[in-house]
Image: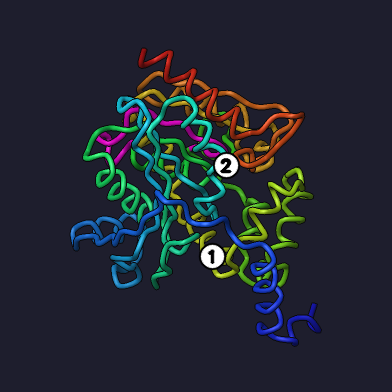
């Protein structure tokens, strides 16, 4: 370990950059666009207070890459797919395609410092990313409420939108996330004990040492992720700077606060998880607790054999993205027909 670290960050950086060259992202589609997100001082103060950070530690603007497909679809079926930690927009393409086949108008985008969006300075929090999401949703759909579908950290952002911007949200589907971002205790409260998995995958020095490819293999071993080409593409196209920066959001998620705040959510909520999401605390008990807490109709579904990376995982001859889009579509039909 010491010998590798002595070789310095230049060798580690060259290793990961070579991987990015070997696995380029797909071409930008015709419906891809860039928009500048600029938050007001009032919004930035709100985020700073919620995040317990000085306002100077947060960047108020950046250039967001997004993909909006608003043609050849039902204008009453608008869905926004929100990626998770380190998740670039192109990774959500299978899910977007699934929704498009079912007549949805779609929006997906890259968070700040992710994918094709710019990399502004400053700290990252779920609240900041949530306010970014609120801006692009309003810009694209003109304030019309949308179905929000979030994966992992995108699920946290989905909850945030449902609480802080309820006028923009028609329903919430989230995969691999609960309000506790961990398991629950027997009394239904969040388990606040030490979480080795999240600790390991959020250590700057460890992530830099492993790099993107080896981090993927570590996820395969620790989280029962199937190391298929589709799953490994997530890691191989990952920016190392993003990989070591975004996990900041995990430790800043206010578990107890949001565990209570979801009681305000009145829209239908669908919680989804792969069987192996239980390894990070997203299990039947934590999902059932959220279902009982939200004010609106809610249910949960667990997909056998799949891991936390279900959005781009294939298992047993099925694509996780297809299961996500089909199950969500059925949920919408139940509540909005």
Q: Secondary structure at mark 2?
A: loop
Q: Is residue 15 above or below residue 305?
A: below
Dot placed on the residue nearer the N-terminal end, 1 or 2: 2
Viewer-nearest residue: 264 or 268: 268
Q: How is the image coloured?
A: rainbow
Report the residue at 59% width, 39% height from top: 311
Q: Which residue is mark 2?
A: 182
Position of the C terminus by quadrant: top left
Q: Position of residue 135 (x, y in %)?
A: 27, 50
Q: Residue 33's image quarter?
A: bottom left
| Nearer to us: label 1 or label 2 | 1
Report the residue at 77% width, 55% height from top: 217
Q: Which residue is mark 1?
A: 242
Q: Which residues are magenta?
A: 162-178
Viewer-nearest residue: 306 or 319: 319
Q: Are marks 1 and 2 in contact (CB under 8 Å)?
A: no
Position of the N terminus by quadrant: bottom right
């Amino acid at each position: 370990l010491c010998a590798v670290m002595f070789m310095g960050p230049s060798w580690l950086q060259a290793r990961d950059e070579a991987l990015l060259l070997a696995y380029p992202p797909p071409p930008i589609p015709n419906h891809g666009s860039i928009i500048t997100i600029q938050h007001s001082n009032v919004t930035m103060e709100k985020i700073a207070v919620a995040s317990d950070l000085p306002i100077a530690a947060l960047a108020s603007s950046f250039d967001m890459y997004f993909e909006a497909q608003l043609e050849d679809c039902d204008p009453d079926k608008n869905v926004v797919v929100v990626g998770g930690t380190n998740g670039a927009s192109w990774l959500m393409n299978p899910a977007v395609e699934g929704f498009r086949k079912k007549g949805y108008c779609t929006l997906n985008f890259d968070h700040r410092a992710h994918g094709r969006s710019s990399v502004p300075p400053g700290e990252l929090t779920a609240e900041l990313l949530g306010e970014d999401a609120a801006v692009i949703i309003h810009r694209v759909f003109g304030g019309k409420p949308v179905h929000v579908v979030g994966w992992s950290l995108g699920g946290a952002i989905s909850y945030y939108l449902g609480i802080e911007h309820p006028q923009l949200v028609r329903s919430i589907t989230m995969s691999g996330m609960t309000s506790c971002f961990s398991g629950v205790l027997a009394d239904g409260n969040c388990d606040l004990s030490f979480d080795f998995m999240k600790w390991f995958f959020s250590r700057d020095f460890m992530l830099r040492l492993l790099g993107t490819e080896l981090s993927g293999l570590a996820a395969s071993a620790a989280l029962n992720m199937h190391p298929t080409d589709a799953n490994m593409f997530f890691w191989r196209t990952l920016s190392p700077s993003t990989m070591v920066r975004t996990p900041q959001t995990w430790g800043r998620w206010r578990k107890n606060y949001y565990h209570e705040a979801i009681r305000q959510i009145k829209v239908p909520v669908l919680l989804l998880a792969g069987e192996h999401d239980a390894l990070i605390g997203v299990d039947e008990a934590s999902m059932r607790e959220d279902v009982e807490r939200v004010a609106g109709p809610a249910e949960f579904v667990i997909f056998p054999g799949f891991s936390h990376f279900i959005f781009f995982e294939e298992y047993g001859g099925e694509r996780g993205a297809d299961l996500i889009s089909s199950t969500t579509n059925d949920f919408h039909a139940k509540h909005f027909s």
